[in-house]
Image: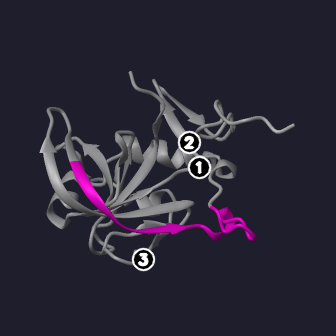
Amino acid sequence: MVYPVPAVLVSCGETEEEYNLITIGWTGTVCTDPPMVYISVRPERHSFGIIQRTGEFVINLTTIELTRKVDWCGVRSGRDYNKFREMNLTPGPSKTIKAPIVMESPVNIECRVTEVRELGTHHMFLAEVTNIQVNEKLIHPVSGKLNLLDSSLIAYVHGNYCVMGKRIGAPGYSVRKKRD
């Protein structure tokens, strides 16, 4: 019952013939130094075997414009469909691994698996972040800071896709002194 969770497209595969996408909700950051993330995947999923064999994947953040494609990729198998082609998504080159990025995604997090934990229905792939690619439109031209709030990222909340983005405060706002 820990919601919301990100709704991401995880891409995997070493060659165009095996490139695949899987929709994942069980993902997140586990460490900042070194930067590490995780995804949890059911062993019967087509992507599971690819990720287990290659030890690589990309977490591609998704937006409101990608919602239908995210949903479709979550209910169709890569054994039966070329999801990139079916959903008119563009595989692009990663900089540090062989798995492709999704060019339509605003943020692509390249990952190399360091450990696999069997947890029951899912296996958790712990991974080091080897590179992050960000759409230049999300970088403020003056400050150089990343602005994800304007990208309309989606999340999954107990059976529904939802859009994120309303800022309600920054860490520490509750204790900062007010300016006169």
- Local packing at callout 3 (Cα closer than 10 Å; few below 14, some 14-19, many 20+) is few
Under mark 2, the amino acid is: Ile
Q: Residue 154: which numbered mark, if any?
A: 2
The quarter of the displayed image where residue 115 is located: bottom left
Decide which of tag 3 and tag 1 comes sooner along the chain. Answer: 1
Amino acid identity at mark 3: Pro
Q: Are marks 2 and 3 in contact (CB under 8 Å)?
A: no
Quadrant for the N terminus in the image: top left
Give the quarter of the image for residue 96: bottom left
**In this rendering, is residue 38 above or below 88?**
above
* Residue 16: % across, % down: 33, 74
User: Where is residue 43, by image quadrant?
Assistant: top left
**Outermost residue to the right:** 180
Which element carries disc 2, helix, strand or loop?
strand
Residue 4, x across and y down, in percent: 48, 31
Q: Is residue 179 magenta?
A: no
Residue shown at the point (29%, 61%) measured from the top left: 128
Residue 93 circle label: 3
Residue 109 shown left or right of residue 136 in the figure: left
Q: Say which mark, if any, is on residue 63.
A: 1
Q: Are marks 2 and 1 in contact (CB under 8 Å)?
A: yes
Of the two numbered discs 2 and 3 on the same chain, state the one appearing first in sequence: 3
Give the alpha-carbon distance from disc 2 to disc 3, as whole Å.
Answer: 24 Å
Q: Amino acid at mark 1?
A: Thr
Name the element at disc 1.
loop
> What range is drawn magenta here?
125-145
Q: Is residue 58 above or below residue 80?
A: below
Q: Position of residue 179 (x, y in %)?
A: 82, 39
Which quadrant of the rendered structure holds the C terminus? top right
